[in-house]
Amino acid sequence: MKAFVLAERSDAARELCAGARTVADEVVLVAVGDMEVPAACADKVLHVALPEGAVFDDAADTVIAAFDAEQPGAVFAEPTKHVKVVAGKLAAHAGASVITDVIAFDGDVATNMYFGGVGQKQQKAAGSVAFYTVGAGVFAEAEASGANATEELAWVAPAKAVKLVSSKPIEKSGVDLFKADVVVAAGRGFAEKDELKLADDLCEKLGAGLGCSRPLTEGVDWLPTEVYIGVSGLMLSPKVYVACGISGQMQHMVGCNRAGALFAINKDKNAPIFKQCDYGLVGDIKTVLPALTAAL
């Protein structure tokens, strides 16, 4: 069997290619734009150069043409917003559905989350081609390999292209959360932006990356959207996750429930997160975080 890998980030491309290698005889990585292709990760790399003014989503028709030529039996996609657009159009073209948010594989049986992470189910892909979106950590133990024979794909212009009005580079802040062994997450328990210094100090002591729940990015704009953890944000699996001032609503917990150990700090003893964490501490973050940082 041949497997397609669609990814936006280099680290995700390597892990998904490694996972695809466990089920496929041939692995084909589709690299769109200027993504850095990992060394020796796939048998073939299909590069899609984006014309000036085009965005990642516009590559869908080019990827569909490559899909028809290669005829893979499985597609593994990184669950980013842009990749989901392309994977969704590709699945529709193939007359297939996508099994989303896969957290484990047992042969051709995928375990995935549904209703935003409320539950899990096991299922096999329907149709002749299996489509999966797979988050970080699922294939962490697998090894990638391949000659990386590179082929430039001819651009297929979309019938309705995305109109790029403007763009600006995003300044990456702090540690890459996908690579971090320890993640500290801030929630609505932080009453003022200046209080985030308490979380920053803890991150410095732990060598951790700082993330947050959705309200701190879209509600008050204290942190960039790139560090939002949750059902429509990042899905992480660090060794340690420290939730500070986070109530534990499902929308957030689905982004961190695969952490090796989950610690929670909240002044509300009835906060839902205390039923989901490994270790909980009831207390005000303004008191607990400085004491914890000082003790480390």
Image (tube, rainbow, N blue to C red):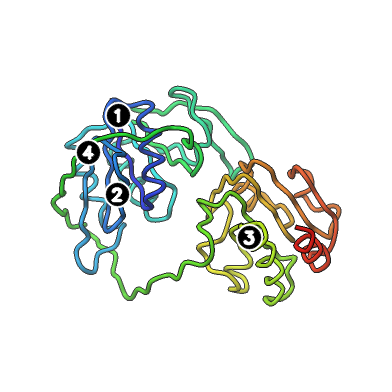
Disc 4 from disc 3: Cα separation: 38 Å
Q: Which quadrant, please, contains the N terminus? A: top left
Q: Earlier in the sequence, mark 3 or mark 2?
A: 2
> How many neighbours does mark 4 have within 10 angstroms: few (below 14), some (14-19), or many (20 or more)?
some
Q: Which mark is residue 37?
A: 2
- In this rendering, the answer to whether 162 lies above or below 84 is below
Q: Vertically, is 123 above or below 52?
A: above
Question: Badges 4 and 3: C-beta atoms under 8 Å apart?
Answer: no
Residue 23: x and y, percent?
37, 26
Residue farthest to the top, as pictured: 107
| Distance from the alpha carbon under mark 1 to that under mark 3 | 37 Å
Amino acid of disc 1: Gly
The circle drawn on residue 73 is 1
- Label 2: state its secondary structure: loop
Instruction: State how far apart marks 2 and 4 are (Cα).
Output: 11 Å
Asked if labels 1 and 4 touch by Cβ distance under 8 angstroms, the answer is no
Task: Pick whichever, 49 or 37, lies toward us.
Answer: 37
How many other residues sit within 10 Å of disc 3, few (<14), some (14-19) or many (≥20)? Answer: many
Left or right: where 212 falls relative to 157: right
Q: Which comes sooner in the sequence, label 2 or label 1?
A: 2
Q: Is residue 232 left or right of residue 59?
A: right
Furthest-left residue in view? 154
Residue 176 pos. (x, y %): 50, 57
Residue at horizontal 23 percent and vertical 43 percent from the top? 45
Question: Measuring 20% from the left and 68% from the top, which residue is drawn there?
Answer: 52
Residue at image point 73% right, 49% down: 263
Amino acid type assigned to the residue bearing label 2 in the image: Val
Quadrant assignment for the C terminus = bottom right
User: Of the residues shown, which amino acid type is indicated by label 4?
Assistant: Lys
